Image (spheres, grey):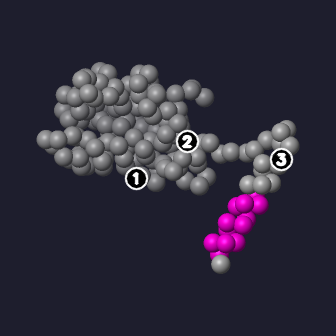
Amino acid sequence: MKVKVIAATLFAVTMNVSRAAPSAPLTMHLHQTPSSSAAGPVRSVWDGVYTEAQKKRGGAIYLRECSGCHGEALKGGEGTPALSGSDFDESWSGKTVADLFNKIRQTMPPPPDQPGKLSPQQESDVLAHILAANDFPAGGAELSPDIEQLKQIRITTARP
């Protein structure tokens, strides 16, 4: 019964929207993604979401664990994506820091090593290094490995 009521309601709403005058704007919340909370991210990478100390720790981990594939300057390599510059912007702008954290967590390092080799804190530190390499500013608090907190930070290439 509930399914029929929901379907009928959706049909009525759809019909009303399609009959709306062309001047009546439709409100869409494009800033929300499946990884963002219902309210959407409340911060951006421009808000200083990592510290200089964390960036430094992340740089050391990156050189040891990531640079063999992604290059010391994060420019990528044969078959591996760049983690800085326009390639990074195209891949990650509009997503959340949680999206990038999860990508690292689930896929890095690739075989013969196994994903999950790094601790969540080490992954946050590497992420701080990546953000710094893309000229996002440091701040007064460390980037947390807590996924719910990371969902609240939007990656955007446009400086506010």
Mark linked to residue 20:
3
Q: Is residue 115 magenta?
A: no
Q: Earlier in the sequence, mark 2 or mark 1?
A: 2
> In which quadrant will I find the N terminus?
bottom right
Is 18 above or below relative to 60? below
**Residue designated by label 1:** 146
Q: Position of residue 90 (x, y in %)?
A: 46, 28
Predominant SS along the magenta part: helix
Residue 47 in the figure: left or right of residue 29 = left
**Residue designated by label 2:** 43
Q: Nearer the viewer, residue 66 or 54?
A: 66
Task: Assess disc 3: are there few (<14), some (14-19) or many (≥20) residues with their C-alpha within 10 Å of its C-alpha.
Answer: few
Q: Position of residue 77 (x, y in %)?
A: 25, 23
Distance from disc 1 to disc 3, alpha carbons, whole Å, reads 43 Å
Task: Report helix, strand or loop for mark 3.
Answer: loop
Identify the amino acid type marked 1. Asp
- Residue numbers of the magenta segment: 2-13
Identify the amino acid type marked 2. Arg
Residue contact at pointers 1 and 3, CB within 8 angstroms: no
Q: Is residue 11 magenta?
A: yes
